[in-house]
Image (spheres, rainbow, N blue to C red):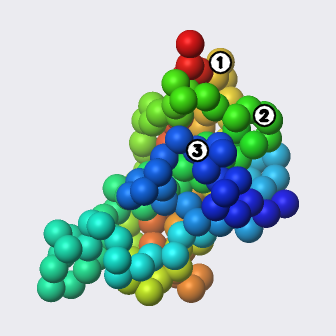
Amino acid sequence: MVMDINEIRRYLPHRYPFLLVDRVLEIHENRILAIKNVSVNEPFFPGHFPHKPVMPGVLIVEALAQAAALMTLKNADVIPDENSVVLFAGLDKVRFKRQVIPGDQLLFDVSMLQNKRGIYKYTGTATVDGVLAAESEFLCVFRAGS
């Protein structure tokens, strides 16, 4: 199953400049593969850094979480309303191994490790051309709108 940007926008409340997943290549019950095409036109590059643009690591981890949210919401067949949100609850074992620069394509590989009482635990990697750029374990919680 593949998701294009239009379907991604149905499941995630994020919008430019904070929507960080461009396409879903595969989605399974407990695993998702998704991509982000990193453009020189990203709004963070003029300040990070003007002389040598590097994608902020925190945004790579955010993109992993967005992929995780897509997997979880799509598999649960839940389209959140305008008051719903998926939030970070914790980050563990975060490591950055390679700089991500304009022209790179990030491949996110995220797996759900467990779901206990609505707190989801994931592990994810972000790679560029098969080289590890970042990895993390993280917790997320879904807060439905009222």
Q: Secondary structure at mark 1?
A: loop
The disc labelled 1 sits on which kind of residue?
Arg
Tell me, yes or no, if residue 141 can be seen here.
no
Left or right, 35 with respect to 20, comes to: right
Q: Where does residue 2 sit, x and y in percent of width and height?
A: 79, 63
Tell me, yes or no, if residue 49 can be seen here.
yes
In the image, which is nearer the foreground, mark 2 or mark 1?
Answer: 2
Determine whether 14 is above or below 34 in the image.
Answer: above
Q: Secondary structure at mark 3?
A: loop
Left or right, 6 with respect to 124, comes to: right
Residue beneath the point at 42% across and 56% down: 16
The disc labelled 2 sits on which kind of residue?
Ala
Classed neighbour count for the residue bearing mark 2: other residues with Cα under 10 Å, few (<14), some (14–19), many (≥20) = few
Residue beneath the point at 30% across and 67% down: 43
Q: Which residue is mark 2?
A: 76
Determine whether 75 is above or below 78 in the image.
Answer: below
Q: Which residue is mark 1?
A: 117
> Looking at the rendered structure, which numbered label has been put on residue 65?
none
